[in-house]
Amino acid sequence: MLDAIDRAIINHLQKGFPVCPRPYAKSAAELGLTEDELITRLDMLLIENRLSRFGPMYNAERLGGAVTLAAMQVPKDDFERVAGIVNALPQVAHNYEREHAFNMWFVLAAENPEQLDAAIADIAGRTGYPVFNMPKLEEFYIGLQLEV
Amino acid sequence: MAATAKMAQGPHTAEPAIDAIDRWIIAATQSGLPRVREPYHLIAADLDLDPTLVMHRLTRMLQAGIIRRIAAVPNHYAVGYTANGMSVWDVADAHVHELGRQVGALPFVSHAYHRPRHLPVWSYNLFAMVHGRSREEVGQQVARIAELLGGACRAQDVLYSTRILKKTGMRINV
């Protein structure tokens, strides 16, 4: 279970981490911890998968990459086969099952829009179901901060 | 399809120039920062660069919006947020920009996007991800969004995630 210190670390480090020679010492001081204590705790949180990432979040589109969200309506009895095909593609970064007629939602990331379109066509061709491409037209930004 | 998508317009719209050094730094850090006392020095040593240069480049990429932020990302499920709902809304396209900004500013909304409809099967054009400790809590959050949208909302739904089928970090070849 998370204790009060873990919670404080997660809440604090979601907001940001400094760029300076001793960044852990700086964040630790703000948290009332020692530098080594913060490093050890952070290691544990990552090993236990309480944190899924720690580091720079790159904006793929600003690096010339292409990203989209796609959705499919997959019959229940064919779901696992389709999930296998979708998940096997390296361009698929996340894939979620959701409770809805549109029951499979995945994020695709590729080096350019052409590769993205090719991956979508490939999935549609191999699964036999249409893939609904829902690229973001605008993002309303947002720093994700969950109070834990 | 995707080629027609207009990408998010942040405060920085000019295409940033990244050079070979930036690419090395991106490749070395996109899976995370090392947990050592001097993480930027360690990255610099691995790349045979000056630590000051590495810190300078990271700061520049932050300022240019190439790095959204350097931070920790909690695993929602593992920190108690077991109800993760994708709320979807049908609002007039003419108002989606302003409404999206208002919805995105709500404290419990982690991401909000304007996305294309696929009529007649998908009429929703505004997506807002909400996270709660229970579906009841998410339901209350969705009700607050509905309240904010008021008469501008023509239809809505919430899609709860029931299973993570795949989750790998987004790897960017640079």
Image (cartoon, coloured by chain):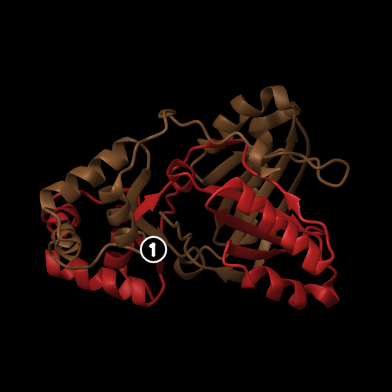
Chain colours: A red, B brown
The answer to whether B156 appears left or right of A113 in the picture is: right
* Residue A14 drawn above or below residue B114: below
Question: Looking at the picture, how far across and down is residue A45, in whole percent?
Answer: 34, 71
- As helix, strand or loop, the secondary structure at mark 1 comes to strand
| Residue drawn at the location 60% of the way across and 56% of the way down | A108
Of residue A95 and residue A133, the one placed in the foreground of this image is A133
From this viewpoint, is residue A50 visible? yes
**Three-letter amino acid code at the position of disc 1:** Arg
Of residue A67 and residue B146, the one placed in the foreground of this image is A67
From this viewpoint, is residue B163 visible? no
| Residue drawn at the location 61% of the way across and 46% of the way down | A113
Query: Disc 1 is attached to a residue of which chain?
Result: A
* Residue B85 drawn above or below residue B5: below
The answer to whether A112 appears left or right of A74 in the picture is: left
| Residue drawn at the location 63% of the way across and 32% of the way down | B148
Question: Looking at the picture, how far across and down is residue B5, in whole percent?
Answer: 64, 37
In which image quadrant can residue B161 be found?
A: bottom right
Tag 1 residue: A53
Question: Looking at the picture, how far across and down is residue B106, in whole percent?
Answer: 52, 38
Of residue B84 and residue A125, the one placed in the foreground of this image is A125
Q: How many marks?
A: 1
Quadrant of image for the C terminus of chain B? bottom left
The answer to whether B124 appears left or right of B23 in the picture is: right
Of residue A5 and residue A63, the one placed in the foreground of this image is A63
The answer to whether A138 appears left or right of B14 in the picture is: right
* Residue A9 drawn above or below residue B127: below
